[in-house]
Image (tube, helix red, strand yellow):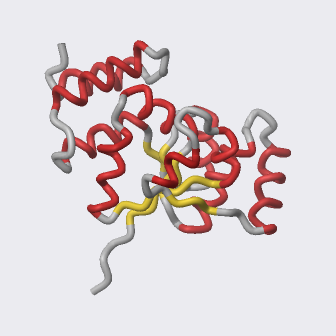
Amino acid sequence: MEALQLRYIVDTSVWISLHKGGIIPQVLLLTNEGWDFLITNFVALELQEPSSQTLIQQGVQMYPLSKTEVAAVEIMVGETPALTQADASSIVVAHTLNATILADDKLLREKAGELRVKVHGTLWLLEQLVAAQLIDSVTLCDALEKMIAAKRWFPKQAVNRLRTRCNCP
């Protein structure tokens, strides 16, 4: 029997949050559990800190879009002008690969939902790290506080639920 493939198309917003929280190395340990993290070439262009080169050196895969996929991105951006090319590319690739998007951007999440593409965010990913025993609750709480201090935005109720579950101070 073939192993379940866990493919995640990761948006810029999540990489920035993980970087601010100081936990990218722990996240990338999920590749040992069968997770594949991909970025599109549009997301790679947006990334500065961390850089796409750094992520690729650490095992993140680059997904270059085909001409057909680039055309689909342009159509989507034309229909929803507030959506960036990077956001649209994540949706197009996730749809193509039947993958899940990891994103915190509200508009991206809404558009993906309209197209029935599965989406999770940074807070969900933090919970997965605890479940996989790659970080403990103390590390999660610390990373979350660093992200919030760095002005990363998450829904207040979701943050409070996570803090309660993990006994954050």
Q: Quadrant of residue 135?
A: top left
Looking at the picture, tell me which residue is in the foreground, 58 or 127: 58
Residue in view at x 34 percent, y 36 percent: 23
**Does residue 159 sit above or below 63 in this rendering?**
above
**Does residue 12 sit above or below 158 in this rendering?**
below
Q: Is residue 64 left or right of residue 18?
A: right
Q: Is residue 51 left or right of residue 28?
A: right
**Does residue 66 sit above or below 140 in this rendering?**
below
- Where is residue 36 drawn, in percent x and y? 42, 61
- Where is residue 9 drawn, in percent x and y? 52, 54
The residue at the far bottom in this view is 1
- Where is residue 140 drawn, in percent x and y? 24, 30
Identify the image quadrant of the N terminus: bottom left
Identify the image quadrant of the C terminus: top left
Count every numbered label the image shows and give the total.
Answer: 0
Residue in view at x 76 percent, y 33 percent: 82
Residue in view at x 38 percent, y 40 percent: 24
- Where is residue 35 drawn, in percent x and y? 36, 61
Q: Is residue 69 left or right of residue 2?
A: right
Looking at the picture, tell me which residue is in the foreground, 169 or 158: 169
Q: Is residue 129 left or right of residue 101?
A: left
**Does residue 131 sit above or below 116 in this rendering?**
above
Residue in view at x 67 percent, y 39 percent: 46
Looking at the picture, tell me which residue is in the foreground, 51 or 114: 51
